[in-house]
Image (cartoon, helix red, strand yellow):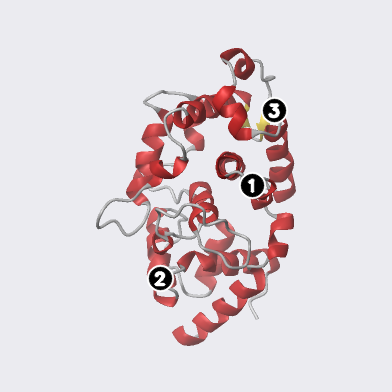
Amino acid sequence: MKELDLKSFLDEKADRYNRIEFIDDDPIQIPHRFTLKQDREISGFLAATIAWGNRKSIIKDAEKMLALMDHTPFDFVVNATVKEIDSIPDGSVHRTFNSEDFKFFLRALQRIYRQNDSMETLFLTEDEEFNFYHALERFRKVFLNDEAHRAMKHVSSTYKNSAAKRLMMFLRWMVRQDKKGVDFGIWKKLNPTHLSIPLDVHSGNIARQLGLLQRKQNDWKAVEELDVHLRRFNPTDPAVYDFALFGLGVSDDLQ
């Protein structure tokens, strides 16, 4: 497929899947339940953190976390006592993300929100940076606060060549200026042109079938290889193609 034809094909698929109906079966429905910016940030970050596996299970387990926060994420994070966080029952929250991980995340978020009005400031890019490679690592360092904990495996490191799929999905939700009502675009200090798609097995396989990706591993090097094509197709909104590649991966609709 010629490049112009491929762009038209992907634009059509992105338009097909980037619709308000997309929310119903996607983890992004979790932050869509809130109107307060900080509620959307916290619930979105937690939902994105467990976004692997079956989407129904992801949503169900994200709802479990909301219930443990009394369905008021920001208020709970800022005001919860040590005893309230420690009293969260032991057990699995979502697959390998367990209650100890959840408690660690709550403590980290509490520290962050007691010092910042928004998580946005932790993801700011610096001059001459054209993607979130360094910003994601800076966020990781602040979030983990030099503490060795089993939860650290749930915060991907781009410096270790991770595609950081779940963090990139969270950034897409918060940063991308979406006129279709799916992504929020509430972080105005971050540039949507710096976004990459949340690369996973499905989107990676579709990208390879379309000739957009040669690298076999779904890692950060693959993200940057894919960026070259997608930013040429749409320099101002490259992450829109996440809808196309994800939708094609789910529907197997390469027609």
On residue 35, the disc is 1
Q: What residue sits right under mark 3 in the picture?
A: 68
Relative to 25, is 7 on the left or the right?
Answer: left
The residue depicted at 59 percent of the width and 60 percent of the height is 202
The residue depicted at 67 percent of the width and 20 percent of the height is 88
Residue 19 in percent (x, y) is at 67, 67
Amino acid at circle 1: Thr
- Seen in the picture, residue 122 relative to 4 is either above or below; the reply is above
Distance, label 1 to label 2, CA atoms, is 31 Å
User: Which of the two labelled residues, at mark 1 and mark 2, occupies the earlier sequence position?
Assistant: 1
Amino acid at circle 3: Leu
Quarter of the image with the C terminus is: bottom right
User: Which of the two labelled residues, at mark 3 and mark 2, occupies the earlier sequence position?
Assistant: 3
On residue 231, the disc is 2
Distance, label 3 to label 2, CA atoms, is 40 Å
Distance, label 1 to label 3, CA atoms, is 19 Å
- Seen in the picture, residue 163 relative to 179 is either above or below; the reply is above
Residue 162 seen anywhere in this rendered image of the structure:
yes
Residue 244 in percent (x, y) is at 59, 70
Residue 242 in percent (x, y) is at 55, 64
Q: Nearer the viewer, residue 14 or 1?
A: 14
Which element is circle 3 on?
helix
Which element is circle 2 on?
helix
Q: Nearer the viewer, residue 178 or 10?
A: 178
Crowdedness near tag 3: few (<14), some (14–19) or many (≥20) residues, C-alpha within 10 Å: some
Tell me the mark number nearer the camera, choosing from 1 and 2: 1
On residue 16, the disc is none
Tell me the mark number nearer the camera, choosing from 1 and 3: 1
Crowdedness near tag 2: few (<14), some (14–19) or many (≥20) residues, C-alpha within 10 Å: some
Question: Do residues under tags 1 and 2 come within 8 Å of each other at their CB atoms?
Answer: no
Residue 36 in percent (x, y) is at 60, 43
